[in-house]
Image: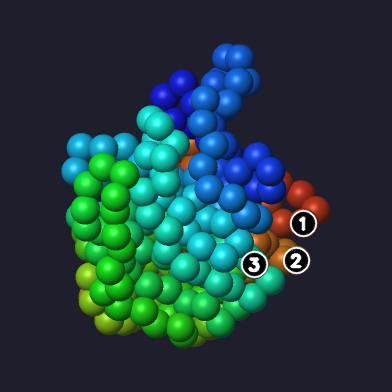
Amino acid sequence: IEGNLAVVPAGGEDGAIIALDKKTGEPPWKCAAGTPGYATPYPFTYKDTRYIFCFGAKAGIIANAKSGKEACQIPWETAYDVNASEPIYHDGHLFLSSGYKTGSALYKLAGEGDDLTAGEVWRKPKLFLTKFTSCVLKDGILYGGDQNGLRCVDFKTGNELWSDNSLRNASVLLAHQSLIIMTEKGQIIVAKATGKAFERTAEANVLGGRCWTVPTLADGKLYLRNLQKAVCLDLKANG
């Protein structure tokens, strides 16, 4: 949702990205073409202009949020066309990640208006192979889980600060100064959001089976699910 618009990765003849008026359903703009990706469109502000990044199947597209004009495309091919992870914009840089041998990269934006370029700062095919999860950013540090484990990485350099290879395909949620981690086997781990070390502060076994859904935190309640059921935990119950 961007102002009065609902922006979706439609694909096909409707355009790679399409904006719909929330009240009428009319499309004020469409951008680019091609098969859509899986990730939700991501709005950000660069040099006082509002943009929307959207993954297609083979590229990341940056559109002007007001006019829908394409400002930039970043080639980004993934096996099975699965670009499911949300990007992260910070300090003029755009971070992208995907699973299936693609990995992650950081791009520095340049230009203005509808004429942007994205210069590669670093790219690592074995770092943050995020099949379905997205990373989070806190104080210049990236945290995320992928098919190889849990990772903590410096945003600007891509250098790894710490890792835990036992926590594969874990989903990570940022809550104030803490990380809420859900393992793919249904264990919840609360840890400090710090680049110094992986410091657990609480943990509990909540679900079983395969848990490939990022937790949702709302009003002190944590919502989780596996393939069969959903669970709500009251994090405020014990103060």
Q: In screen coordinates, is 20 left or right of 70?
A: right
> Relative to the observer, which residue lies in front, 235 or 149?
149
Which label was assigned to residue 81? 3
Which label was assigned to residue 125? none
Q: In screen coordinates, is 48 left or right of 179?
A: left
Q: Can see residue 27?
A: yes
State the residue at coordinates (36%, 63%).
Answer: 95
Compared to 153, does 233 lie above or below?
A: above
- Number of numbered markers: 3
Q: How is the image coloured?
A: rainbow
Compared to 194, does 151 lie above or below?
A: below
User: Mark 3: which amino acid?
Assistant: Asp
Q: CA distance from mark 1 to mark 2?
A: 7 Å
Q: CA distance from mark 1 to mark 3?
A: 23 Å
Give x and y (percent) for residue 188.
Answer: 54, 61
Q: Which residue is mark 2?
A: 209
Give x and y (percent) for residue 19.
Answer: 54, 32
Please state, as top left, top right, bottom left or bottom right, where the C terminus lies in the image.
top left
The furthest residue to the right: 228
Q: Which residue is mark 1?
A: 227
In the rendered structure, which disc, 1 or 2, sits on the residue that comes first in sequence? 2
> What is the secondary structure assignment of the residue under circle 3?
helix
- Image marks 1 and 2: residues in contact by CB distance under 8 Å: yes
State the residue at coordinates (53%, 48%).
Answer: 32
Q: Residues within 10 Å of mark 3 (few under 14, many from 20)?
A: some
State the residue at coordinates (42%, 73%).
Answer: 104
User: Mark 2: which amino acid?
Assistant: Gly
User: Mark 1: which amino acid?
Assistant: Leu
In the rendered structure, which disc, 2 or 3, sits on the residue that comes first in sequence? 3
Compared to 103, does 88 lie above or below?
A: above
Q: Nearer the viewer, mark 2 or mark 3?
A: 3
